[in-house]
Amino acid sequence: MKNIYSKLVLLGGMLTFSACEKDLQYKSYGDLSSVVSTADGAVAAVNAAYTGLAGGSDWQGGWDAGTYGWRTQAMMTTDEGVCAWGGDWIPLRNLNYTPDFSWVTHNYTAYTPYISRIAIVLNDISNMSAIDADLKKRYIAELKALRAHYAEMLYFNYGPFTIITDAKIAANPNAPYVARPTSDIVVAQIEKDFTEAAADLPKKFTGQDYGRFSQAAALTGLMKLYMHEKNWSKAVTTGQSIKQLGYSLLPNYEDNFNTASKGGNSSEMILAVVCSSSGGDQYSNMWLAHALPSDYKDSTGIPLTAWGGYKMPWTSYDKFDKQDKRLKVLLESYPTGKTADGKVIYKNARLAGDLGAVPVKFAPDPSKANSQNMGIDFPIYRYSDVLLMLAESINEAAGAPDQEAYDAVNAVRNRAGLGNLPAGLSKAAFLAKIQDERLFELFGEGWRKDDLIRWGLYTKRAQNDGSSTAEAYKVLLPLPRTVITQSNGIIKQNEGYN
C-alpha cells in the first residue's frame, strides 16, 4: 500500500458509510461478503476507514485546511486565528452558532458513520481466516485506534454520544434510537480502544505504511483523552511511555512542515495526513492557498495560489519572543516580488492594516507540480506536543513542576532558540508558560481549542474579543437539529441550544 490517501476515492465509494445514530439518510452497504472476506478486501476496508483523517468526501476537511477541518475550526475559534473573508467566519469566531449553523454541526453527521462502518469491518475481519494472523491483528488494532480517534474528536466537540460497537446494530437501519450515554461510558470505550490498539501496533510506521496509526499515535490519542478528563496521573504515565518509543525533536522546527518529514523520515512526526500534489483536493495540502496574501510572491520563484484568508491576530503574534525561530513560518513582513537587481521586496502586513500575521506554517512544495495543492504532509500528532502535554500533566499531578517537566518544555524552547524557563516557578506560573508555549509551538495544528477548554479560557477568549454570544455552554457544539427531530427527542440537544 503506497500513498494510502491518494488512492481512496474509489474505495470510499465502494465501502459506503452509514450513520451510527441513523443521522439523516440511511444507505445500504450492499453485499460486501465478496470484498471483506478476502485479504484484499480487508486492506480496502481498513484503508477506507483512514479517509476520515482527511475529511472523507469533504473538501479539505478532517485535518486539512478547509472550513470543516478540525485544525481550521480550532484555529478560528481561539486566539490562534482570524479570517479576513467575513461571512460565516465571523459567527464562527464569535461562537455565535446554532443547531442550524452547518459549519459547526457538519462533522457530527460526517464522522458518526465512520464509527458504524468500523464496527462492521472489525466484525468481518475478526471472522476472516484467509489472512495472515499477524496482519489481521494489526488491522484490528488500526481500526480500533481509528474508531477511538474519531470518537474522541466527536466527544471533545459535541459531548457524549453513542459509540456503536455491535456490528448488527450498526448495519440495521431500523435499530431503535437510544438516549445519549453519560461521559464516563464514552470515555471508557475510547480508552479501551486506544489501549487495546496500542498493545498490538508497531512503535512506528515508515515507508509505504507511513501515515497509519502506530503504537505511539494510539498512546498520544489516549494521553489527550486523559488530559481532557484531567486524569493527570494516567496522562503522566502515558506520556512517559511514549518517551520510550524512540521519538525525538527534529533539529529544525520548520522541517516538520516541509518535505523533510515525508515517508516516515521524521523522528518527531507521530501521525500525519499524507499529502500529494496530484492526489486530489482531499489528499493535498492547501494551507498556503488559504493563508497567503494575494500579493505574496515566493522569493525562490515557486508559483503559489494565494487567497489571503487565514491570519494570526496581532495580540497573539506579539506574545512571541522576537528571537523565536518559529517566527520563520509566521510572518509580519512577507515577500511581494523583487527589484530589477534581484533584491526581495517585503511588505509589512501590520502597517498595511491586515488583521494579523501570515501563518505560513507549511513550506511551498519544491516539486512545483501544483500552485494550489501541495504535497507537504499535515501533522496530527507530533512529539513536541507530547513533551508539552507531559510537562503540563506533571505540573498538575504533582502540584508543581519537577525536573522532568522542565526538561520537556525546555527541549521545545531550546529548539526554537530560546533559553530555559526560570527555575522555581509555581504551579500557576509554570502553567502560564505552558499555555503560551503551546501557542508558539502548535499554532494551526488543531489542538488550541481543546487546550483553551481544558484551561477554562475558551469562551473567555471570545468575550475578551468583544463577543456577546460566547456563553459558557459554547464549549460544546450543537448537535444537528435533524438528529434531535428524527429521534423524536430521544437524543437530547446540548445544553443551551434551542
Image: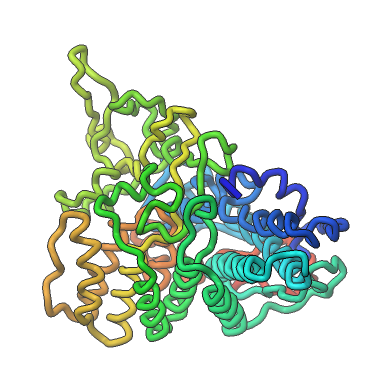
Answer with left or right where residue 280 lies relative to residue 403: right
In this rendering, the count of numbered labels is 0
> Where residue 170 sits: x, y (%)?
78, 69
> Where residue 408 sits: x, y (%)?
25, 70
Of residues 23 and 56, which is closer to you in this image?
56
Q: Residue at x 26, y 63 (%)?
A: 436
Q: Is residue 325 above or below residue 153?
A: above
Q: Could one spot residue 97 in this view of the protein?
A: yes
Q: Which quadrant is home to the C terminus?
A: bottom right
Of residues 216 and 371, which is closer to you in this image?
216
Of residues 102 and 118, which is closer to you in this image?
118
Residue 381: quarter of image:
bottom left
Answer with left or right where residue 226 lies relative to residue 97: left
Q: Residue at x 38, y 50 (%)?
A: 81
Of residues 132 and 470, which is closer to you in this image?
132
Q: Residue at x 77, y 49 (%)?
A: 14
Answer with left or right where residue 471 lies relative to residue 463: right
Residue 411: quarter of image:
bottom left
Q: Could one spot residue 147 in this view of the protein?
A: no
Residue 122: quarter of image:
bottom right
> Where residue 188 sits: x, y (%)?
58, 83
> Where residue 274 sits: x, y (%)?
51, 48
Q: Is residue 247 above or below residue 48?
A: below
What colouring does the structure picture have? rainbow
Q: Residue at x 57, y 47 (%)?
A: 2
